[in-house]
Image (tube, rainbow, N blue to C red):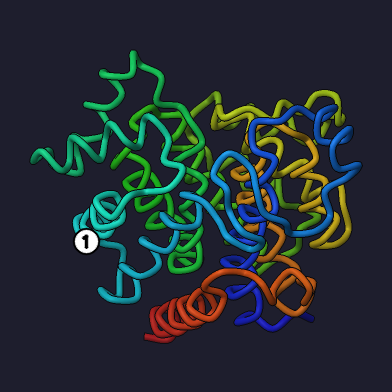
């Protein structure tokens, strides 16, 4: 039986590791990855961002903004999260996506967090159903795991800051429902347990479909539902943390985010101790990530016993 605190730690470390493992091959197709590297199984540097081994992208950076805010405030506070996002943005955000960039620019110019995502949605031509909403939202699942209604509300709000499209909003809620299920219950009934709680029909259908998908059905794009399906499929069709992440990253496409989402799911199930030490050792900010997860565990525990 995996200790609960190890699941909390595994979730956030897993997210960062999936991001770091996938970042050097982001944008490559499956065939190109295979031709260049055979099969990616180790942390290495490079890619379009020129990262070092164990370094990560905007996925983990924004997750850390949310986690730091939760720990600092003792709750989910979108206004404080915006301040954290803007601090990162103004410091030179690495690897930031277009929709997120447009939304944060609107926030910097005075838009409220409730309006920024919709402004970005309009400015990018209605294309705000990207996976930026789900790459970063795992700390909310840890905090709200025992309160489904609050988890859904906070997850949607976290997406609205940058990604207004209802599929992005409910994609974040669906992922966090899955993470909360894995923290406390059996993964064997994961899809059955969460599908009925998803109110947005396209997101509900996409999650339900994972059960019957084959590998050739998985599309590793930046569309939120493709990423959600890919991460869930890789997690459910493997039997270890390492195999889940290797499967996710070698799909090609948006490898860092598919890896990050799969890593959050897998880490929440397998726990920190089942994550390979050879991956953990070079991971940037590993100590802080574990500390934040531990503090969110304590906040969640306090909410439960209060």
Q: Residue at x 47, y 52 (%)?
A: 136
Return the residue found at the far top: 125
Relative placement, left or right, of 226 versus 30 is left
Direction from residue 188 to residue 198 in the image, left or right: left
Total labels drawn: 1
Q: Residue at x 69, y 83 (%)?
A: 3
Which one is in front, 80 or 250?
Answer: 250
Q: What x and y, as percent, mark residue 180?
A: 57, 61
Residue 105 x, y percent position in the rendering: 21, 37
In which quadrant of the rendered image does the N terminus lie? bottom right
Q: Residue at x 81, y 35 (%)?
A: 33
Mark 1 residue element: helix
> x, y (%) of residue 49?
54, 44
Between residue 77 and residue 41, name the one nearer to us. 41
On the image, the x and y values in percent for residue 285 come to: 52, 73
Residue 23 to residue 282: above or below: above
Q: Which residue is mark 1?
A: 80
Q: Quadrant of residue 302?
A: bottom left
Residue at 86 percent across and 31 percent down: it is: 215
Q: In which quadrant is the C terminus drawn?
A: bottom left
Q: Is 176 located above or below residue 109 in the figure?
A: below
Circle 1 packing at 10 Å, graded few (<14), some (14-19), many (20+), is: some
């Amino acid at each position: 039986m995996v200790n609960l605190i190890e699941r909390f730690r595994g979730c956030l470390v897993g997210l960062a590791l999936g991001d770091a493992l996938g970042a050097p091959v982001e944008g490559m197709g499956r065939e190109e990855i295979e031709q260049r590297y055979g099969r990616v199984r180790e942390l290495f540097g490079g890619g379009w961002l020129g990262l070092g081994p164990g370094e990560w992208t905007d996925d983990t950076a924004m997750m850390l903004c949310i986690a730091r805010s939760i720990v600092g405030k003792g709750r989910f506070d979108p206004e404080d999260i915006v301040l954290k996002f803007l601090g990162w943005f103004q410091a030179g955000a690495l690897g930031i996506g277009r929709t997120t960039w447009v939304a944060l620019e609107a926030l910097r110019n005075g838009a409220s967090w409730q309006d920024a995502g919709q402004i970005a949605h309009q400015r990018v031509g209605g294309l705000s159903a990207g996976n930026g909403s789900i790459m970063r939202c795992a700390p909310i699942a840890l905090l709200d795991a025992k309160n489904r209604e609050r988890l859904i509300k906070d997850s949607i709000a976290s997406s609205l800051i940058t990604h207004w499209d209802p599929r992005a909003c409910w994609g974040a809620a669906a992922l966090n429902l899955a993470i909360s299920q894995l923290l406390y219950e059996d993964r064997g009934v994961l899809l059955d347990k969460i599908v009925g709680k998803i109110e947005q029909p396209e997101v509900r259908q996409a999650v339900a479909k994972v059960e019957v998908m084959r590998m050739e059905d998985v599309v590793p794009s930046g569309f939120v539902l493709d990423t959600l399906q890919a991460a869930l499929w890789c997690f459910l069709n493997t039997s270890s943390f390492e195999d889940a992440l290797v499967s996710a990253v070698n799909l090609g496409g948006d490898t860092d985010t598919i890896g990050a989402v799969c890593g959050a799911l897998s880490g929440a199930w397998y726990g920190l101790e089942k994550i390979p030490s050879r991956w953990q050792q070079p991971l940037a900010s590993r100590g802080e990530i574990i500390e934040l997860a531990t503090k969110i565990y304590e906040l969640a525990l306090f909410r439960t016993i209060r």
